[in-house]
Image: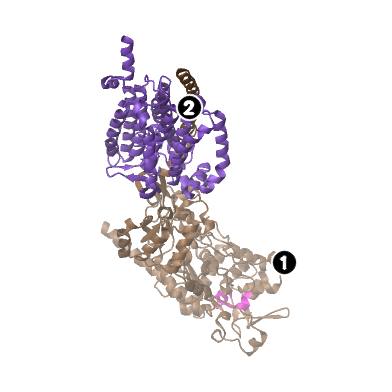
Chain colours: A brown, B purple
């Protein structure tokens, strides 16, 4: 019985144990299948995930290219900057870390708001700037307490620096932190302290100045500590930009214009190099680096002298009497007047039922071309403008570069306006009137020019009619060969070497005016400063053998009523600043072998002869004296060598 | 004469013959598994025997000795001691309710001065002993009676209740399944298990309410690891990444990036299998699983030749408990089961699981050495 019972128990046991063993086998094959799935089928995917865990990519910011003047002086450069950043994902307690940090570096509530916002918005592995421009001692203290501040990184960064501050700000522009649109998907832009061009050349040439980001792959552990560097691709610095600007001359021009709302452009008449392009008042681009304060911004915006505007290229003014060379050339070429023909000026010019007035109330008397330009007789030009007609005047203006845009790689260049029949019909729906032509004859009415264009016009007169174009930046050989594609191939510096003296950049086309007439006009412009009756005689340049030729201009910005004319035209000093005349002067020097052309516009400065001509003379004298000193230096150097 | 002599030899073996008959090959396999653990603990420490590998080795030696001693003791002694051991384990379990030391967020330890004892570990074996004894004394017919289900279920329910209160879900499951395996093999009617399964499924919503938040979170995270990739799901995700990236051949000894760079959590304890699979690949993982299976299938295969019901049930029950130990841990790190906090015996750093495994193996070896002894239903020495 007992044995039988034991047998039945054994049989039951055997069956059940076998079932259990089968079940276990099933479970084990489940494990094996899972291992096969994970380690064979899904291996690649998990390998990638493991690499992502292990490898942290650090972006290495490229150094921004410098902007240099024609002698290699740094107008925009990079300065070392001590700063502290925080990588949010590496900090277990962001608020605690911030609290600890604020004991070392001063953090205002505004800073804290900015930091918290950045932490919310950015990806957690992108460092957030806590404080920059730290003193060395504060920086050293942060370094000492580093073990207690996980995720905090002390960094020696670079900050954009404009050592000459206000000087050339309108050309250089400024940089700032990229905004959300600009960031796009380029991670380098998310780096703290990374700046992009916001204005001026910094903006236009931003891509090329920026350079190429490098990266460093580092192995990190689970808490983010760097174990070792796995690989590294160094960043490539941005290109240095060589300007044609002469820092000395730029500085002198800006100082000479002082606090006026004015601009001056100095150009090499042969190759178009822009040696000075000053606009006053100016601003300090350094203020924009880390975000300008509201107060400073309001000041800049509220100033009626518009410091943010680059008047040399954006300012559009009636050229006034500086336009008379164009009218004269058009008339000479058309044969409607000869240089010796005399036209009588009694101070008034009647056309239909309208009377036009010469600036000289009782007239100049008999005027030939030379005298009319030297003394800026309006009646003479009313008459020859009427004779030659608007079409030929517009054509001549265009040939001398007015109404045209030049790509100086700075923003907001204005086109100006050279009006014509079609233009008036299209914009005002009215037919061109002879009175319009007469107004244009003295550079008033519809015609508008920029100081840059006036400088180009003067250069083309001074060089005998070569269609020179303004150049602000010397393109590298590489760039000339490769076209304009942005590139960061190394070796710029070697290719450029010293500043290359470039002979002729323009097309070499000619304005196509007979040299006879060109000489005629140049001679008349010489009379402006050399003839005792000339409007700029007082501003003559009396450096031996280096006279200046030119033309004054006074552009009216208000309408003078008949009533006022009868009771006597108000003097500029007696009317509000904004209604006063613009003072203009264009000129070149030296007279016999022209090298520099200049255009000066002083907004609401009064008369060209008193407000603009002296400024132009001083700037040109400075340029010529500089040249003389340099020549002497060069000769001395060569003398030493031989 | 010869026959009676041989019968005597079967019932009363000398110590020497027991030592001779001992399955030394099995002992060597066990040592091999433990050695694998030492190697991994050396790697976890970044190539150092401190702080884990050395202490693990020091622990292994007494455990090995204990196993051999247990194996040499007559299986009838274990039958005799089955209920007392169960009673003692239960008493200890209740004692930790009041004097227990907290570790890893749960009340599990009792301090014995020289070492810390985990009564729940003792209970894993004790439950199997008690149930094996219970069914040893009952006939198959008695075992299949419904009213005779009461006593075994009580034996299971009481310790389960206390372990679950600690709270230790993993150990509770081991105790329950080890006990159920004994009941199953003893011949309890099949439909009862079916009904029990149905009842459990019906009870899931109720039990869910009773679970601690961290247990709920572990279950939820198991069902969807991406639910919380930086919190609770982190462990499972990182473990799967480590396993998967190990590939077939592994990243090499001490080259596992996931474990060496600390992305893998608790790698010296619960996740040591993951680390092995990362550094030695599919080949290493299958080798280790294979060694465990060799050890555990011995417990099952050997039981078919055991003449006593107690020996059979004990061997099968212990094997099942130890199997589940290994299975739950490996399935957990592979993302097949929720993270319930079950270590991998012999491999994971820590003495309790190792001790349980070695004691269990000692009992299996004891059954094997005394497999020819017939034990009457009435009692051990009756």
The answer for which chain carries disc 1 is A
How far is the residue under mark 1 from the one under mark 2? 112 Å
How many numbered dots are placed on residues in this image? Answer: 2
Q: Is residue B304 above or below residue B248?
A: above
Judged from this view, the residue extending furthest toward the top is B1
The image position of residue A369, as x and y in percent, is: 58, 73
The image position of residue A628, as x and y in percent, is: 36, 67
Q: Is residue B379 above or below residue B232?
A: above
The image position of residue A558, as x and y in percent, is: 62, 79
Residue under numbered circle 2:
B186
Badge 1, how many Cα within 10 Å: few under 14, some, many 20+? few
**Magenta stretch: includes residue A335:** no
Nearer the observer, A229 or A247 = A229
Provide the major secondary structure of the magenta segment: helix
Q: Is residue A138 shown to the viewer in this render? A: yes
Asked which secondary structure carries label 2, the reply is helix
State which quadrant residue A82 falls in.
bottom left
Q: Which residues are magenta?
A: A368-381
Query: Do pointers 1 and 2 mark residues of a single chain?
Result: no
Nearer the observer, A493 or A319 = A493
Left or right: B106 in relation to A303: left
The image position of residue A266, as x and y in percent, is: 47, 67
Q: Which mark is residue A425?
A: 1
Asked which secondary structure carries label 1, the reply is helix
Q: Is residue A233 shown to the viewer in this render? A: no
């Amino acid at each position: 019985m007992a044995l039988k019972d034991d047998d039945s128990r054994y049989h039951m046991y055997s069956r059940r144990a076998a079932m259990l063993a089968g079940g276990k086998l099933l479970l084990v094959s489940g494990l094996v299948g899972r291992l096969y799935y994970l380690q064979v089928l899904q291996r690649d995917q998990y390998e990638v995930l493991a690499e992502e865990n292990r490898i942290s990519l650090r972006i290495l910011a490229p150094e921004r290219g410098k902007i240099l003047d024609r002698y290699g002086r740094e107008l925009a450069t990079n300065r070392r900057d001590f700063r502290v950043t925080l990588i949010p994902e590496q900090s277990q307690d962001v608020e605690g870390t911030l609290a600890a940090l604020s004991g070392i570096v001063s953090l205002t509530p505004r800073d804290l708001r900015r930091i918290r916002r950045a932490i919310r918005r950015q990806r957690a592995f992108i460092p957030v700037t806590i404080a920059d421009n730290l003193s060395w001692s504060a920086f050293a203290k942060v370094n000492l307490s580093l073990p207690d501040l996980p995720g905090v990184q002390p960094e020696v960064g670079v900050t954009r620096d404009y050592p000459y501050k206000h000087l050339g700000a309108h050309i250089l522009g400024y940089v700032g932190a990229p905004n959300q649109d600009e960031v796009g998907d380029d991670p380098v832009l998310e780096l703290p302290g990374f700046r992009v061009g916001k204005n001026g050349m910094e903006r236009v040439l931003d891509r090329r100045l920026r350079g190429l980001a490098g990266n460093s792959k580092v192995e990190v552990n689970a808490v983010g500590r760097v174990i070792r560097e796995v690989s590294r691709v160094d960043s490539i610095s941005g290109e240095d930009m060589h300007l044609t600007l002469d820092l000395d001359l730029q500085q002198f021009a800006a100082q000479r214009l002082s606090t006026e709302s004015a601009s001056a452009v100095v150009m090499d008449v042969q190759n178009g190099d822009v040696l000075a392009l000053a606009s006053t008042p100016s601003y300090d681009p350094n203020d924009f680096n880390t975000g300008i304060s509201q107060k400073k911004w309001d000041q800049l915006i509220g100033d009626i002298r518009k410091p943010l505007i680059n008047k040399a290229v954006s300012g559009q003014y009636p050229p006034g009497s500086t336009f008379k060379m164009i009218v004269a050339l058009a008339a000479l070429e058309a044969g409607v007047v000869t240089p010796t023909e005399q036209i009588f000026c009694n101070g008034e010019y009647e056309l239909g039922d309208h009377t036009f007035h010469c600036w000289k109330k009782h007239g100049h008397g008999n005027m030939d071309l030379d005298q009319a330009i030297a003394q800026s007789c309006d009646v003479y030009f009313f008459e020859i403008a009427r004779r030659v007609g608007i079409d030929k005047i517009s054509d001549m203006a265009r040939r001398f570069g007015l109404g045209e845009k030049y790509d100086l790689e700075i923003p907001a260049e204005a086109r100006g306006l050279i009006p014509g029949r079609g233009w008036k019909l299209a914009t005002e729906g009215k037919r061109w009137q002879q009175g319009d032509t007469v107004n244009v004859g003295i550079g008033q009415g519809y015609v508008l020019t920029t100081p840059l264009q006036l400088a180009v016009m003067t250069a083309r007169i001074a060089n005998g009619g070569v269609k020179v174009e303004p150049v602000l930046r010397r393109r590298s050989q590489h760039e000339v060969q490769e076209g304009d594609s942005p590139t960061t191939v190394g070796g710029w510096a070697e290719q450029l070497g010293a500043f290359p003296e470039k002979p002729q950049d323009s097309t070499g086309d000619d304005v196509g005016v007979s040299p006879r007439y060109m000489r005629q006009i140049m001679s008349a412009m010489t009379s402006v400063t050399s003839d005792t009756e000339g409007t700029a005689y007082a501003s003559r340049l009396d450096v031996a053998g280096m006279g200046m030729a030119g033309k004054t201009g006074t552009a009216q910005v208000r309408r003078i009523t008949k009533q006022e004319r009868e009771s006597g035209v108000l003097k500029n000093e007696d009317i509000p600043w904004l209604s006063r005349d613009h003072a203009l002067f264009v000129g070149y020097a030296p007279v016999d072998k022209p090298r520099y052309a200049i255009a000066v516009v002083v907004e609401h400065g009064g008369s060209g002869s008193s407000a603009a001509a002296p400024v132009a003379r001083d700037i040109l004298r400075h340029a010529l004296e500089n040249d003389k000193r340099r020549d002497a230096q060069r000769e001395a150097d060569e003398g030493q060598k031989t | 004469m010869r026959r009676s002599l041989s019968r005597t030899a079967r019932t009363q073996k000398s110590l020497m013959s027991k030592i001779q008959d001992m399955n030394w090959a099995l002992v060597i396999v066990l040592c091999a598994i433990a050695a694998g653990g030492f190697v991994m603990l050396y790697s976890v420490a970044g190539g150092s025997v401190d702080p884990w590998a050395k202490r693990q080795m020091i622990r292994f030696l007494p455990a090995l000795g204990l196993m051999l001693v247990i194996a040499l003791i007559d299986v009838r002694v274990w039958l005799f001691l089955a209920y007392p051991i169960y009673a003692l384990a239960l008493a200890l379990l209740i004692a930790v309710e009041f004097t227990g030391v907290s570790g890893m967020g749960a009340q599990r330890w009792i301090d014995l001065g020289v070492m810390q004892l985990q009564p729940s570990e003792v209970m894993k074996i004790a439950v199997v002993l008690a149930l094996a004894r219970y069914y040893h004394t009952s006939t198959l017919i008695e075992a299949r009676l419904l009213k005779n289900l009461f006593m075994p279920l009580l034996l299971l329910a009481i310790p389960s209740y206390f372990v679950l209160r600690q709270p230790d879900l993993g150990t509770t499951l081991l105790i329950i399944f080890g006990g159920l395996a004994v009941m199953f093999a003893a011949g309890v009617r099949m439909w009862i298990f079916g009904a029990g399964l149905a009842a459990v499924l019906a009870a899931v919503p109720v039990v869910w309410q009773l679970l601690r938040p961290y247990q709920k979170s572990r279950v939820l995270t198991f069902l969807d690891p991406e639910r919380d990739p930086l919190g609770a799901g982190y462990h499972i995700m990182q473990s799967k990444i480590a396993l998967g990236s190990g590939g077939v051949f592994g990243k090499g000894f001490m080259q596992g990036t996931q474990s060496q760079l600390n992305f893998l959590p608790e790698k010296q304890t619960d996740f040591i299998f993951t680390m092995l699979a990362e550094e030695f690949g599919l080949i290493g993982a299958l080798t280790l699983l294979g060694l465990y299976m060799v050890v555990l299938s011995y417990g099952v295969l050997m039981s078919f030749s055991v003449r006593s019901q107690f020996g059979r049930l004990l061997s099968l029950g212990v094997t099942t408990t130890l199997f589940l130990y290994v299975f739950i841990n490996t399935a957990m790190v592979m993302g097949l089961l929720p993270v319930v906090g079950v270590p991998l015996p012999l491999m994971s750093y820590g003495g309790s699981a190792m001790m349980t495994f070695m004691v269990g193996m000692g009992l299996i070896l004891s059954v094997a050495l005394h497999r020819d002894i017939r034990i009457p239903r009435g009692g051990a020495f009756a």
